[in-house]
Amino acid sequence: MKSLHARQAPLADTGYQLTVLTQAEAGGAHLPPFAHQLRESGLLPLRPTSLAVMQINVGKMCNQTCRHCHVDAGPDRTEIMTRETMAQCLTALAQTDIGVVDLTGGAPEMNPDFRWLVEQISALGRQTIVRCNLTIIVANPKYHDLPEFFARHRVRVVSSLPHFSAARTDAQRGDGVFARSIRGLKMLNAVGYGVEGSGLELDLVYNPSGAFMPGNQISLEREFKQRLGREHGIVFNSLLTITNLPVSRFLEYLLESGNYESYMEKLVAAYNPVAAANVMCRSTLSIGWDGQLYDCDFNQMLELPVDAQAPQHIRDFNEQRLQDRSIVINQHCYGCTAGAGSSCGGATT
């Protein structure tokens, strides 16, 4: 599979994605604007509660092309964060008490300055999270020492694994991905990741393979631990469940499979005001590979920058003005507020 960008597909245009998302009618049933739901919940305008996490997308290049990827990442994407932009992120970070830097991509490890960035974050005394797809560890000998590098800098590893079965994982991520993911997990376990008492945290991320919401996070974690432990000898700390948002390649899947309207109706029907109050954009600042600022990773992929009254680029970082901003919303936000809620840290309620 190639990315939407490489195929020059209509949905490669974020303006077209937003047109689809903001259509008022779906199967004859009115989908209320997300802003209306927030108003009813007393949350409009939605504003930050803190600035606790700096999430940095260091590039869209990836060794995989997953069918549900909201980033539209893949081997054919060339967007990559420069060291100069990374340095601007570090300058901003040093001005704040932000305790966590969440590195994502693509496969963030493919950025040639990835290790330098992790070292600099570590030197500032902040925790690093890396969103690792697992297969990158075994993709090339130059990545084989990533588990040791992560351990040396006490990086928290958050790894996507759509399912504990090969068939369901490979259906979403490509043939052979499950087997390579298991190899990567075993290499992480070998240096202590996920092992009780090691202090090296390894979390897995589950997102559904179809047009449905994830099940109960606690129950799924128990099942994943039992199956991966029994069948592969794998241990990990926590399972994080994430709802697929109707963005990019998952939006393409919904439209091509005829599930778009029913999926959106499910999200709207499951709107949870408690989850809405706990959305990750209220405590996270998202930074694009080019230094542009966004309220969350999903807004970044839809090219919806932060409110015009706030700084637009990391070089102009101003914590107070960013704290005072209104968060930009659209219909895709229903995905983060449905059911138990969804965030990069899993369920929110």
Image (cartoon, helix red, strand yellow):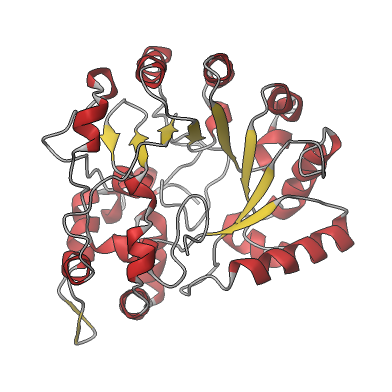
Q: Image quadrant of residue 194? A: top right
Q: Residue at x 21, y 39 (%)?
A: 306
Name the residue at the bottom extreme: 28
Q: Closest to the observer: 2 or 46?
A: 46
Q: Image quadrant of residue 149? A: top right
Q: Position of residue 303 (x, y in %)?
A: 24, 43
Count of marks placed on residues: 0
Query: Against 314, is 266 above or below?
Result: below
Query: Against 22, is 108 above or below?
Result: above
Q: Residue at x 38, y 57 (%)?
A: 278
Q: Is residue 23 left or right of residue 301?
A: left
Q: Position of residue 282 (x, y in %)?
A: 32, 47
Name the residue at the left extreme: 309
Q: Is residue 94 visible?
A: yes
Query: Against 250, is 256 above or below?
Result: below
Q: Closest to the observer: 285 or 70?
A: 285
Q: Residue at x 52, y 48 (%)?
A: 65
Q: Image quadrant of residue 52? A: top left
Q: Position of residue 224 (x, y in %)?
A: 73, 63
Query: Against 171, is 29 above or below?
Result: below
Q: Is residue 165 visible?
A: no
Q: Residue at x 73, y 36 (%)?
A: 200
Q: Position of residue 262 (x, y in %)?
A: 35, 81
Q: Is residue 235 left or right of residue 274?
A: right
